[in-house]
Each structure stands twice: as structure tokens, then as C-alpha cells.
Image (cartoon, rainbow, N blue to C red):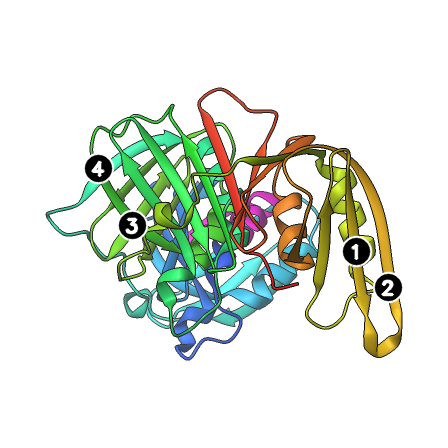
Amino acid sequence: MRFVVSSSDLLGRLQVAGRAIASKSPVPILDNFLFSITGKTLSITGSDSEVIVVTTMEVNESDKDGKVAIPGGKLVEYLKKLPEQPVTFNINDETFAIEIATVSGKNNQVGLNANDYPQLQSLGGESQSFSLSSDVLLAGISHTLFATGNDELRPIMNGVFFDIEPDGITFVATDSHILARYTRTDVKCGFKSSFVLGKKPAALLKNIMSAGVDVKVTYDSKSAIFEADKFKMTCRLTDGNYPQYRSVIPTNNPFRVMVNRQDLSNAISRSALFSDGTELIRLELSSNSVNVMAQDLDFSCSANEVVACQYEGEQMVIGIKSSYFSNIMSNMNSSDIEMQLSDASRAVIVLPVDKKENEDELMLIMPMKV
């Protein structure tokens, strides 16, 4: 088998598929890329057995169809050091010996039998599918992924929940300390369903999915397939029942704080430098200001900053974990935010003031004991 391909185009495709490959795989063949030629189309697959990413590109020349598993690490590093030029692959179909020829020279290595590479699993007969813009998918993941958990005992919390409704889709993530919910009403699925997409495949989609393309999502009870232009990802879904997230969002919140997001975020970040190991920050709410306070008794240091705000409610002091709140602030785009609360012991709701059409965003943070 022989084919010729652009070095820069190939490197770009390898970097996409390579994100699925684990740094240390117990299965040796998963350190390789699967190359498959059909006509003048080259399909490149990377996998860690849980996630399979396939991307395609056109080759300049090809003498016949075929496939081979090619070691990934050296090939990517070699192409990074190579200027743009045609690269010729000559592959022995029996021994899987690979010769890679360029304008300035050539190198040799040995591939593996492609039949030993994990194959894409077909979905069951009860699969469902819907389509949405990649912009919606990326926004949903970007606004929620940071709130996923890392608890091995509760894997269902370590992913993004897709709550599918006939007239919209909601993305949810929570680690039980913070919760992020992002809803789009411009996606018409036509049915009610749900699944949990694990953290790694969600992050892969966020990092490698192109903007402005249509994405087809097909899934059953165990796996999901995301397909877009020159891209296909198959992954296992997280098994289990996702928590009833709606029940933890308080609905009676008479007290409201309107404040500039960046001003409050900066004040909390600076004050956090003087907090103790718990990262406890005290927010003292009054009619026209938020006092941001932190202290570390062990090192006799403290901080107190004042941020202007509009507050409707009783004067109170609430405790928050600085890193949690900073994550929420950095994943909201609105210049001003509204905080809704009822008392210092109940969850604080954070909403954007600048809302977009067909979009609803909500963040929630559980308070700390002051």
C-alpha cells in the first residue's frame, strides 16, 4: 500500500485523533494510530478503548485501499519538525514495515496488524438521535464541564448530564458543592431522554470540535456517537441515574445582589491569598457594598476589600469557598451578575444579567459555615 499526503494536513489530523490516546495504555496497539485508506480518503483513528476518535482527510495519491496501525508518538514528533511538503508512505501489506519518504530523506519503522485495533461498536436497535449546532454543543459543555466531580465512588457525578426535552436541551454538571446548568431552547429534539457524557469525551469535544458545523448525536443506553464534518467520536456513556438536580435549586430567594462580575471575582481572588487552608471567604452584604473578607489565624494575616453593589435584603454574612466561586465567575460571560439567596445557610444562585435569546444559564454554590 502506498499513499502521498500533505505533511501539515496530516499533522493536524493526527493531533485531533491523538487526543483520544492515553499517555500510558495497557494495550500496546492503542499507542498507535489506525490508518485506513479508501479511494483517496484517509481515515485516522485514535483510541483509549473507552473513547474512539476518527478524523478524515484527502490524500494526494493512493494506489489501493488498505489499513495499518502506525506508532503514534514518533510520527507526530517527526511531522512537527518537518516543513510543509508531500510525504510518501510505503507499507508492506504482509510484514507491516513502513517507509516514510520526504524530499530530504526517509525513515523506517514497523506497524501492526490493523485487525487487532479496537473497532467501532454499533449501537443497539433502541438508539435515538438528534442534531444540533456545534456552537450549542460547545457552549453547553464549556458552561458546565468545570463543575463535574472527581469522585471515583460516584462516577455518575463525573460527567455532563444531557437533559433532552422536545423543545430544548439542558446541560448540567455538579460535584455536590457547585452546580452549573445551561439550557438552550433553539434545539428541537422532538422527544424526552437523557444521558451522561463522561469528563474525558466532553473535554475532547470542547477542544477539537469545530465551530459553526452541524453535529449529529446518536446514542443508546451504553454508548454515544458524535458526528460532524470530517470528525466522528464514539464513547461509552456513564451508567447510572443522575441526581434530581432541579430539587436542589432553591426557588424562594427574596434577597438579590447585583454586582460587577470581574470586580467581585478580582476581590475574591486577592482576598483568597490571605485565607486559611479551607479557602473560606466571608461576604458581608449591605445595601450598596459587598465586603470581601478572609483571614488565616495561624499566620496572623487577613484581607478586607469592598466592592460596590446593589443589594435588596437584610444585612448578612455568608461563607463561600474561593476556588469554587472563582470557577463560577470565570465560566460566565456576563459583565454583571445577580446573586439570589434567602439566608446564609442555603445555596446561593448566580445568574448572568446579560442574557441571550434562547439561552438560560444558572450557577449554584453551596455556602460554608462562617
Are the residues at dot 1 and dot 2 in contact (C-beta closer than 8 Å)?
A: yes
* Residue 1 in sight from this viewpoint: no
Q: Position of residue 215 (x, y in %)?
A: 37, 34
Quadrant of the rendering where the C terminus is positioned: bottom right
Between label 1 and label 4, give the one nearer the viewer.
1
Q: Which residue is mark 1?
A: 293
Q: Amino acid at mark 4?
A: Lys
- Residue 263: quadrant of the picture: top right
Kindly check if marks 4 and 2 are in contact, taking CB atoms under 8 A apart as contact. Answer: no
Secondary structure, mark 3, is strand
Which-is-in-front pick, marks 3 and 2? 2
Checking the image for residue 360, the label placed there is none
Q: Residue at position x 33%, y 53% from top?
A: 196
Task: Name the residue located 10 percent from the left edge and 48 percent from the top edge.
Answer: 125
**Residue 339 picture location, percent across and down:** 60, 38
Q: Nearer the viewer, mark 4 or mark 2?
A: 2
Q: CA distance from mark 3 to mark 1?
A: 41 Å
Q: Amino acid at mark 2?
A: Ser
Give the number of the disc on residue 195.
3
What span is colored magenta in the figure? 1-15
Mark 1 vs mark 2, CA separation in Å? 7 Å
- Dot 4 falls on a residue whose secondary structure is loop
Which residue, given by chain and number where applicable, does mark 4 sit on? 192
Q: Which residue in the structure is indicated by mark 2?
A: 302
**Residue nearest the viewer, comparing 106 with 28:** 28
Do residues under tags 3 and 1 come within 8 Å of each other at their CB atoms?
A: no
Quadrant hosting residue 101: bottom right
**Badge 4: few (under 14), some or many (20 or more) residues near its Cα, within 10 Å?**
few
